[in-house]
Amino acid sequence: MTAKLLENKWHLNVDEGFLCRFIDSKTEREVLHTHEFFEIFLNQTNKLAHHINGRTVELKAGELVFIRPYDEHYCTHNQPYSFINLAFSQDLAHSLFRYLGNEFPSKLLLESKTCPSVTLSDCERRNVENMLQTLNIIAPDKTRQKRIQCKIILAEIFGNYFIDYSQETSDDRPELFVDVCNQMHNKDNFKEG
């Protein structure tokens, strides 16, 4: 299967540099693709099959996934599924990582062999959903306001949920161990041990 390139002009609002969509299995095309842009998506369905860079990873509801332009991926499920997708320009991504500074693990996020993801608690998932929904309620003619709000949301998402991303949790450990480590980022699981 050859990956199709998804171009900015069809998947981003050009003036704003991003597009937030609520996607379900009725509207999603299950086609292997890459992007000219970055994206994060918040999975809302258990056991969603994410085919990424030649591997298949089973995602849980509440898993937040970071997709880089060079990642080849698509999602499938044998039941109806949904996720929230925030596609954002390379310009916005580079601006975000410059803002977060050298202490933030942006190089690891960008160069990881595996697709960076974290599992959110129910409270964190609702918080991210609410933040993403605010992007779609700002008046369409408020381009500057929407772009600033998107930057704030991206900084909050990456600053809160990807700040502890490390090479150890990404590339060289068995998938089951990576899954357990990701689950320990969930504050509820961390408290219980």
Image (tube, rainbow, N blue to C red):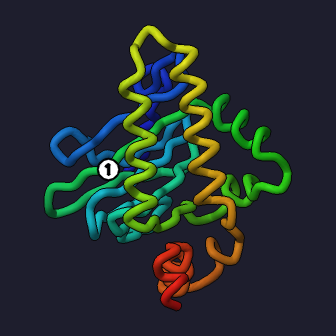
Q: Residues within 10 Å of mark 1 (few under 14, many from 20)?
A: many
| Figure check: 171 above or below 130 | below
User: Is residue 57 or residue 131 the one in the foreground?
Assistant: 131
User: Is residue 50 or residue 97 the one in the foreground?
Assistant: 97
Whole-percent x, y for residue 140 in the image:
40, 13
Residue at 25%, 51% in the rendered image: 82
User: Is residue 7 or residue 177 the one in the foreground?
Assistant: 177
- In the picture, measured across the screen, residue 163 lies left or right of residue 2, that is right
The answer, for residue 175, to whether it is visible in the render is no
Whole-percent x, y for residue 131 in the image:
45, 41
Whole-percent x, y for residue 74 in the image:
36, 52
Kind of residue sitting beneath label 1? Phe
| Figure check: 72 above or below 181 | above
| Figure check: 118 above or below 1 | below
- In the picture, measured across the screen, residue 26 lies left or right of residue 49, that is left
Say which element carries label 1.
strand
Where is residue 177, by image quadrant? Answer: bottom right
User: Is residue 124 or residue 61 the one in the foreground?
Assistant: 124
Where is residue 149, by image quadrant? Answer: top right
Residue at 38%, 47% in the rendered image: 129
| Figure check: 100 above or below 126 | above
Q: How many marks?
A: 1
Residue at 34%, 35% in the rendered image: 21
- In the picture, measured across the screen, residue 5 lies left or right of residue 147, that is left
The answer, for residue 145, to whether it is visible in the render is yes
Residue at 63%, 64% in the rendered image: 113
Residue that sits furthest to the bottom in the current view: 193
Q: Which residue is mark 1?
A: 83
Residue that sits furthest to the top in the current view: 141
